[in-house]
Amino acid sequence: MIYIISDEIEKNHINHLSQSFILKIFIRRVKRRKTRNSGAYVIT
């Protein structure tokens, strides 16, 4: 059981890392767009 739980936690951790990585790329792209368009895309 302990191994299964730790494996699930590791999967969740990897998913979280990839999600935050995708989010960073997305935010960078939106920031680039924001400089071209006059503040149309704003991330709060």
Image (spheres, grey):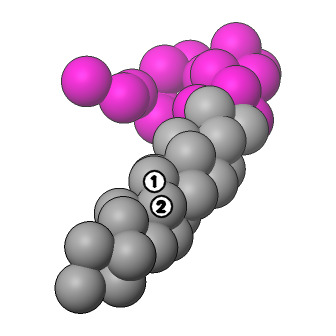
- As for residue 38 lying within the magenta part, the answer is yes
Residue depth check, mark 2 versus mark 1: number of the one nearer the observer? 2
Please state the horizontal and vertical placement of residue 44, each as a whole percent of the image: 25, 24
Asked if the stretch drawn in magenta spans residue 3, the answer is no
**Residue ID at (36%, 66%):** 6
* Residue marked by disc 1: 13
Measuring 45% from the left and 53% from the top, which residue is drawn there? Answer: 13
As helix, strand or loop, the secondary structure at mark 1 comes to: helix
Tell me the kind of residue under disc 2.
Answer: Glu
Residue type at tag 1: His
At 49% from the left and 20% from the top, the residue drawn is 39
Tell me the quarter of the image containing the N terminus.
bottom left
Question: Residue 36 in the image: x percent, y percent?
Answer: 76, 21
Mark 2, residue position? 10
Comparing 44 with 24, the one in front is 24
Within 10 angstroms of label 1, few (less than 14), some, or many (20 or more) residues?
A: few
Q: Tell me where residue 33 sits by quadrant.
A: top right
* Residue 39 drawn above or below residue 16: above
Which element carries disc 2, helix, strand or loop?
helix
Depth check: 41 or 25 in front?
25
Marks 2/1 in contact by CB < 8 Å: the verdict is: yes
Where residue 40 appears, as percent x and y from the top left, is: 47, 33
Q: Nearer the viewer, residue 27 or 39?
A: 27
Front position in the image: 3 or 36: 3
Write down the region rendered in magenta.
27-44
